[in-house]
Image: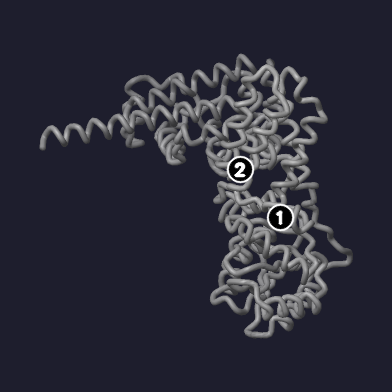
Amino acid sequence: MFESLTEKFSSVFRSLSGRGRITEANISDAMHDVRKALLEADVHYNVVKQFCKDVTAAAIGAEVIKSLHPGQVLIKIVNDKLTELMGPVDSKIYFVSPGPTIIMLAGLQGGGKTTTAAKLAKYLLAKGKKPLLVADDLRRPAAIEQLVVLGQQINTEVYREESQDSVKVAKNGVKYAAEHGFDVVVLDTAGRLHIDEEMMKEVAEVAKAVSPHQIYLVCDAMTGQDAVNSAKEFNERLELDGVILTKLDGDARGGAALSVKAVTGKPIKFVGVGEKTDKLEEFHPDRMAGRILGMGDVVTLVEKAQEQFQAEEAEKLQQKMAKGSFGFDDFLKQMQAVKKMGGMKDVLKMMPGMGSQMEDMDFDESELQQMEGIVHSMTTAERREPDMIDSSRRRRIAAGAGVEVNDVSGLVKTFTRSRDMMKSLSGGSLGGLRRLFSGGFNMDTLGAAMSSGKKIKQRSKRKRTIIRRGKRKRL
């Protein structure tokens, strides 16, 4: 997300970093480029105008002109203003007692409302709640069936009726939840291809009938300013409590995320960053500002990593690292954890300075599968003691995994170097970082995987080139 905006911001800051000192004219030129970048990202014009005005005032007020590092100071100011623009943090769901807490989702058709309902239910399950999904989108064909399937995937009950009365279904769903011990109701309502009076009247009647404790508007981030305009109209009729932006992973511009709070006054509660039911994240303006400016999002990366490791298992891994007895089974567990965290690309994007380099790296997620294949072709003893993997064993492993012997040798070599590095640094400067990651996920193993994956990919490309050349010669 935000790749285009990140690239343009980086270009602006690079132009300033080469100057010992800058002038008001330099700042004005820089803000001209920032303004252009924001408008190209489909940020609302009034938001862009005010943002640039605020940054300019803060830059001059902070005496950036007198600073020895004006580029760095300006980055800090822009980061703070982006955080203010999208903030404050307000991802908390306010639960009532006694329950059930009623959460109503509204929005246009095609915005991902039904999928978001399931994602939200899964999020609530992780928080220890017992949610009930109510299928009240009675207009879109197969909407009810879709919600039922999603409910089965996350082991959550779905209330449904053979009815065309959305008010009746909503009221009965809430009643069912109260009678059967559900503490949260997630109400999926009907949408339209565009805003019209009939739709607004229907959702208003549903809201009046069940008195939801919170109403969230689900917006497709890829529609840019259209998402902001629809949010404004819905808010005038429903008094929204927040916005959920979907498909943020597919929007390289990010205009909706930067505009919706400023235009509607309603906070962004969550963002959808993928199609799977676990791809719903709490929205943190400061973290998002860091991603936009190419500074990464280490806090979210840490949280994702910690979710994949139990404390006891993490402690065992830490001890193995310190002793240098870290084996391929442990390596594989960490690679699988990376996949659960969203894959290598998603992890790298959250690392400071890595987001802007992703295009050049051209990392193929399938390389992780190839590495898994190599490891699975090893015996239990070989995975436990990689040093015993001699040339004959490498030939056998390569044949079993369907790869070249050099691929196996490269993975073993990279793994060994990483393991030795972990042992030497176990009590050093990286110890704090490793403890931050609960002793499980660590930067060294990630680096090893990247290095090995890139080498395998390069060899595969060379091999394909040789084959193509051979065919041309024969022809």
Q: Nearer the viewer, residue 150 or 237?
A: 237
Q: Residue furthest left?
A: 475
C-alpha distance separating marks 1 and 2: 19 Å
Q: Where does the image place residue 377, in percent across and percent down from the top left?
A: 40, 35
Q: Quadrant location of residue 267?
A: bottom right
Would you name the residue on which mark 2 appears?
Answer: 36
Q: Nearer the viewer, residue 235 or 120?
A: 235
Mark positioned earlier in the residue sequence (1 or 2): 2
Q: Residue furthest right?
A: 97
Image quadrant in which the N terminus is located: top right
What kind of element bears circle 1?
A: helix
What kind of element bears circle 2?
A: helix
Q: Quadrant location of residue 201?
A: bottom right
> Which dot marks residue 89?
none
Residue 140 placement, left or right of 298: left
Residue 131 visible in image: yes
Would you name the residue on which mark 1 appears?
Answer: 260
Residue 310 visible in image: no
How many numbered discs? 2
Q: Amino acid at mark 2?
A: Lys
**Could you tell me if the residues under marks 1 and 2 are in contact, i.e. CB atoms within 8 Å?**
no
Q: Where does the image place residue 66, in percent across and percent down from the top left?
A: 77, 20
Q: Who's the residue at 62% across and 61% down the image?
A: 226
